[in-house]
Amino acid sequence: MSFSKNFPRTIEGSNYPRWEEVFLTELEEKEVEEKSKQENLALMKECIEDARQIMKEKGLKEYQSDLVALAISLFEKRSSHVVYHKESKAKEKFDAQR
């Protein structure tokens, strides 16, 4: 099933928008997923290095489990979900239809 998102389109002379559903093609959806995956891998590597630096600066012992837990916390705060990127792509398509 392909990803879809509804967006309001303003109708002149009406107080209510008309909702339009925008679908991503299978190719667009796969491209967004792959881009998100690559960004998330790079972000996790960055978070691991940041966690290592934080532990070093604070004089904490670098136990692997603690390092990974801190990196995951950083990652969760920084990362965006794939759905966000799909919604952004759908919004681009919606705006291009104007």
Image (spheres, rainbow, N blue to C red):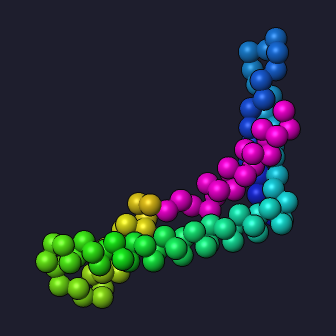
Q: Quadrant of residue 25?
A: bottom right
- Residue at 73% over, 52% down: 89
Q: Position of residue 75 (x, y in %)?
A: 43, 68
Q: Residue at x 77, y 23 (%)?
A: 10
Main SS, magenta region, reads helix
Q: Residue furthest top?
A: 13
**Residue 93, horizontal then vertical, whole percent:** 80, 46
Relative to 34, 48 lies left or right: left
Is residue 26 visible in this depiction of the protein? Answer: yes
Residue 89 is one of the magenta-drawn residues: yes
Which residue corresponds to the image point at 24% horizontal and 88% vertical from the top-left? 63
Residue placed furthest toward the bottom: 64
Can you see residue 2? no
Q: Quadrant of residue 2?
A: bottom right
User: At 82% across and 40% down in the image, what residue appears?
Assistant: 96
Q: Quadrant of the N terminus?
A: bottom right
Q: Is residue 64 left or right of residue 84?
A: left
**Residue situated in front as seen by the camera: 44 or 5:** 44
Judge from the rendering whether residue 69 lies leftward or rightward of residue 98; answer left or right.
left
Q: Is residue 55 left or right of residue 46?
A: left
Residue 76 at x, y percent in the picture: 43, 65
- For residue 82, above or below residue 34: above
Bounds of the magenta segment:
79-98
Figure quadrant of the C terminus: top right
Q: Is residue 54 above or below residue 87?
A: below
Q: How many marks?
A: 0
Residue 90: x and y in percent read: 75, 49
Vertical side of 30 occupied by 66: above or below: below
